[in-house]
Amino acid sequence: MHISLENIGKKYGKTWIFKGLNASIESGDRFAILGGNGSGKSTLLKIIAGQADPNSGSIIYAGTPVEEVYKKLSYCAPYIDLIEELTLSELLHFVGSYQAFLPAFSKGRILDMLAYDPNKWIKDYSSGMKQRVKIALALFADVSLTLLDEPTSNLDEIGVEWYLEMMKVVPEDRTIIIASNLSREYAFCKKQLDITNYK
């Protein structure tokens, strides 16, 4: 999915978080949004996802009406919760009922890649285990755009290695946008935007 950000600005009250932001994100790009805590990275992701409106500027999704964009994206963020009253197996079945997984990633293969007990309640998973599940749901969804907000939050070193390995199996034509201030999360991104340049 090709995305054009044209003079995007967002403010809370009278304070601009960022403004005059322009970027062209091509289909298949690995694109990193950089900046410190509170710089507006998560806010920009929400704008791209259609969850928040900019105060200035516009977004163009080539070939996709804005009201249809949500059908073509997946999202992983620390503030997005899983349904904890389900087992992992039930959760995958539920998510797969409204958003298909990639053809090469059946429910069984995803369970194998997570290597967790499929019959264990999500509420009994550690924060790191839940984060891996969220990453898997985002990366293996059959969509053209994936948004990742601080994807290695709560992951230990083994979890970070798992994340990097999973990134290698995502289709090359998938557009991936990562909001981060940790180089381990976005080192493979060939395009980067420092949001602090748009204050």
Image (cartoon, rainbow, N blue to C red):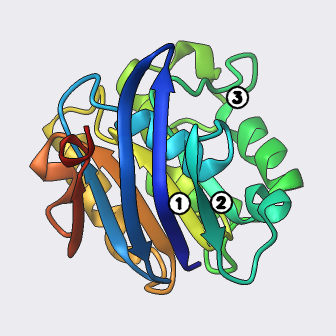
Q: Residue at x 72, y 66 (%)?
A: 72
The residues tagged by marks 2 and 3 sit, at their Cα atoms, a distance apart of 24 Å
> 128 left or right of 58?
left
Q: The C terminus lies in which quarter of the figure?
A: top left
Q: Is residue 7 above or below residue 126?
A: below
Residue 114 higher or lower than 87, as above or below: below
The residue located at (30%, 30%) in the rendering is 153
Among the two numbered marks 1 and 2 on one chain, the one whose residue lies closer to the N terminus: 2
Which is closer to the viewer, label 2 or label 3? 2
Q: Secondary structure at mark 1?
A: strand
**N-terminal-most mark, 1 or 3:** 3
From the viewer's perspective, is residue 90 above or below residue 3? Answer: above
Q: Position of residue 93 (x, y in %)?
A: 80, 47
Query: Residue under circle 3?
Result: 87
Whether tag 1 and tag 2 are in contact, CB under 8 A, the answer is yes
Within 10 Å of disc 1 (Cα), the crowding (few <14, some 14-19, many 20+) is many
